[in-house]
Image (cartoon, rainbow, N blue to C red):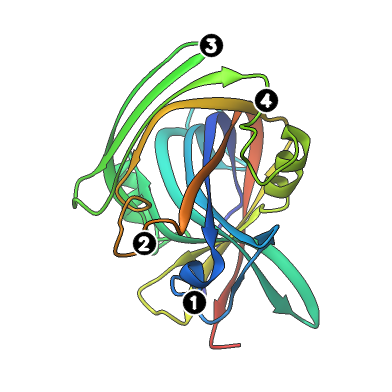
Amino acid sequence: MKTIVPTMQGLIDRRMLINFRVQQDVIRKLLPPHFRPKLVKGWAMAGVCLIRLKDIRPRSFPLPCGVTSENAAHRIAVEWEENGMTREGVFIPRRDTSSVLQAFAGGRFFPGVHHVADFDVEENNDEFHLDMRARDNGVFVEVHARRASRIPAASVFASLDEASEFFARGSIGYSATADPNCCDGLELFTSRWEVEALDVQSLRSSFFDDAAQFPKGTIHFDCALLMRNIEHEWHVLPRMEGEL
């Protein structure tokens, strides 16, 4: 009998999108056969989403029964063909969470395998320090960032508005599963879409700093964006299975 997964709702309390531009031939090696990289001025875009979710619960459930958690999702902007149309979103090779409950449910009762991680977060209105380390030693991320008025001049995006528009179109996410030809799907719906620029003071990422995976010169930090206090819903999508 097929399990019916409810729509989940809650609040995006804080979301940092740390973005890299990557040579497309390097990114292609990391993608399942369904996808091709979505390009900006010839570059593929990848990064990590560092998001604190509050009051996550099935849509019909009232407060205060929701779950609050810190989460990290490594993402790659992608395109694919579906019913004769080009679609776009992100492929997520890895998800990590501070919630043991989410890690247990992910890949079983809710789309996307999640790994348990420890998060150390210090922040105020203008400055953010986040240290994430997966308990299986799979990945770590360390970032120190401050609110800014604009994105870096070296970014592939001409402006904050242009970057915002690009990432707003990545609301559909397909997560890796144990089967390389199968992905779990979720679509994010937000009550509004507002982003600010972040000035990244320091950044370490075991995933993107791996020279075996991203040889020197093939990857560059591009920009970072911030979202806060946004109501949202997660809608489950059918699994994507088989090769294109």
Q: Find the residue positioned furthest to the left.
A: 136
Image mark for residue 32: 1
Quote the CA–CA distance across marks 1 and 2. 20 Å
Q: CA distance from mark 1 to mark 4?
A: 34 Å
Please, is residue 65 above or below residue 125 in the view? below
User: What amino acid type should be assigned to the residue bearing mark 3?
Assistant: Asn
Of all residues, the one furthest to the right in this rendering is 84
Tag 4 or tag 3, which sits nearer the N-term?
Answer: 3
Q: In the image as oriented, which residue stretches furthest toward the bottom?
A: 243
Q: Which mark is residue 215?
A: 2
- Residue at the disc numbered 3: 125
Q: Earlier in the sequence, mark 1 or mark 2?
A: 1
Q: Residues within 10 Å of mark 2 (few under 14, many from 20)?
A: few
Q: Position of residue 28 (x, y in %)?
A: 51, 73
How far apart are the alpha carbons under marks 4 and 2? Answer: 29 Å
Residue visible at 61% across and 59% down?
43
Q: Earlier in the sequence, mark 1 or mark 4?
A: 1
Sequence order check: which comes first, mark 3 or mark 1? 1
Q: CA distance from mark 3 to mark 1?
A: 39 Å
User: Compared with residue 239, is residue 164 higher up or lower down, i.e. above or below?
Assistant: above
User: Where residue 174 sits: x, y (%)?
Assistant: 55, 64
In the rendered image, the vertical position of residue 13 relative to residue 240, given as above or below:
above
* SS at mark 1 in the image: loop
